[in-house]
Image (cartoon, coloured by chain):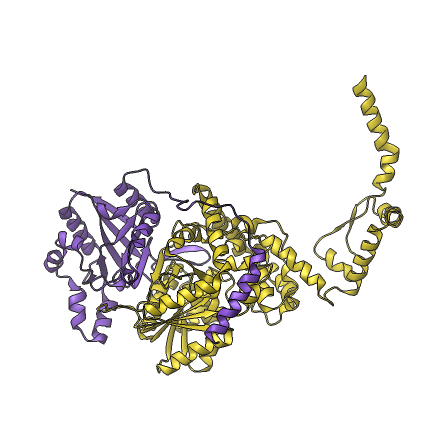
Amino acid sequence: MSHVDYVRQEHHAFLKASDEALSNPALQQILDKLGDSLGQKNKDAWDAFEQHDLVRQRARAIKDDTLAALDKHLATLEESVTRRGGHVYWAENGEEASGFILDMIQSRGAKKVVKSKSMTSEEIHLNKTLEKHQIEVVETDFGEYIIQVAGHRPSHIVGPALHLSKDDVAEILSEEAGEELPSNREALAAFARRTLRSRFAEAEVGITGVNYAIAETGSIVLVENEGNARLTTSLPRIHIAVMGMEKVIPKLSDLKYFLKVLARAATGQKMSCYTSLITGARREGELDGPEEFHLIILDNGRSKILGGPLRESLFCIRCGACLNACPIYRNVGGHSYGGVYAGPIGAVLTPLYDGLADNHHLPHASSLCGACQTACPVKIQIPEMLVRLREQLHEEPGQLGRMESLAYGLWARSLRSSWLYGWGTWLATRTIGRWKRRTCWLRRLPGSLHGWTKQRDFPAPAPERFRDWWRQEGQHQTGNEEQRRES
Amino acid sequence: MNRDAFLTRVREAAAAGCAHRVHLNDIPGGVGYVGTSAEKCVALADEISAVGGEAIVVESPVAAKDAVATLLKQYEAASALCWKHAVLDRLKLPELLADTNVAVHDHSTLAKLPSDEQRQAILAADVGISSVDFAVAETGTLAVCSKPGRERVISLLPRVHIAIVEESQIVPDLFDVFEQLGKLSFDDLPSNLAFITGPSKTGDIELQLTTGVHGPGKWHVVIVRDA
């Protein structure tokens, strides 16, 4: 099979995974397209929407206000959901959340589950737990279905199978079908429609994520383009929704601002094809929709983030715009990041959720160019957060190598003393500066400093110090200039 | 985890986090209203075409009925799922379907079937015919609320969805829908409200658009002007 499984086993493999991604021409071709398609569409959508900036600020303010009294809004949400006949569960971590879901499915004697795309369920490794207990879970988002069959992890927040080519998909689905499927999109989508329809019809339980939960009405909102989330919440008898606790918004009228920006950010559409506002189970007399509604509210490390300086990362509405805008993501692809969430926001979230020490490469996996922040519908200051994480990283003992520590130590010392700085720069210009006066670049630094020069050259010191040049030439020239002006 | 312990921890964290709030200028409510400057029916039809649907504006219920008849013929529909709705009654849709030999399933016929036959009937239908609660001219969006007689699967399961919209149901902007929804009491909010903007789409293979992967691949909207 032509595709490579990028699922990373070790967190420290970021560099290795990026190297592999960079030398995979098929993947590079797809990633190249990403900026021109989704990235450009996002920009065009902002341009065409005159008040986009104000709406984005408004959405940002709603998130900020909500988080300031999050406990209150969550309690209101619980009350509203319960009043509409639903059930609420509070899960401290992924294990607890998966446990609730497993218990519920088992207590109803159910065996078959359909799921619509949910990053939160990915975060709690739900499928693994359910499969271990012989419960059949089928992902129904087309991209998720493809990678579930292939055994991959999502490589993009909104396009989970982005890393696969049409031929890869044909090969994967042909194996599943037990017959040769043609390598064209319509035929492959038709196969998925056929296969998944029967899964929808059989399933007793439908599991979804939550894009927004509205405290005052007890509604959850699902935004999608395919219709699989609507099917998941229309056909099975039981609906279970899993939400990260930061997904709550206080009022129904708050939702309209988010709907104005979410699709524009994610795909450049004004509205996604389907936005469902689901309030409880089916009502008396209705023929479709679930008979039971359960909502799981997940903390899983979020309260730790909420109380700290990186609280703004909880504003994220999972649109993927920062991935499409990021020059790093568009080179190394989603799997290199290792965590559930990739791209710039993943580089912030993964260290926060899974520990900074284990993910020390991620805060550095950015050029801090700021394209992510410009694209973000809620204007999250991602570059600033990455810098803060880098700071934290360097405060942790043992994060710097010996050579790096030595180099930074010398640098700091010499900056504190003018004669030492003067002597150091004199030495550097007289030695390296003069040796390299022709090329001006160092191709290879010694020892572990070579890490820096592996992918690019290092600028050599000039053959002469600026202060020496200034003493001889600069002052002289300025003097001439002044004389000319006076005369 | 115990509810109270969960919320206590959140309360403490939220309080601590207030030191790191982002400072924002006050943004007035209602910002972001776009609406439309064109005539409502035309604007809606244009947006529907832009998102991959097919819209037709007609001058009378009779013309709308003809438009639906043409579509049923075009798709060689043998069975249809239908809403019960005053707009459809004004079209005399039940008569049309009886004349054209299309097997019709609506709330009253489906409710009489045992559940597995009911399931088979809805899964087998060729066409779904509904009206809407609102249509949004700015985005080409149809808002449909569930209630008995207005089943959610009708706009979802068949390969073809035909929606009949009367001019009076059209609002300029999504915000107008939210204003109407805001007037509903807690208990009156429907169990399911779907905003539909286009045929079912996916870009999951190589970022190329493919329609009809789960929901209807064909989306027709017949817009009836007020008399």
Figure label count? 0
Colour used to depict chain A in the structure image? yellow
Residue at the image point whose x is 32% and y is 75% from the top: A202
Coordinates of residue A329 in the picture (x, y in percent): 57, 56
Up-down: is B44 above or below A153?
A: above
Foreground: B29 or B221? B29
Left or right, A66 with reference to A393: left
Give the quarter of the figure containing the C terminus of chain A.
top right
Foreground: A410 or A185? A410
Q: Is residue A181 visible?
A: no
Residue at the top extreme?
A487
Foreground: A107 or A472? A107
State which quadrant residue A242 falls in.
bottom left
Coordinates of residue A139 in the picture (x, y in percent): 41, 69
Left or right, A337 with reference to A287: right
Coordinates of residue A102 in the picture (x, y in percent): 43, 79
State which quadrant residue B33 falls in.
top left
Left or right, B145 with reference to A135: left
Foreground: A328 or A232? A232
Colour used to depict chain B in the structure image? purple
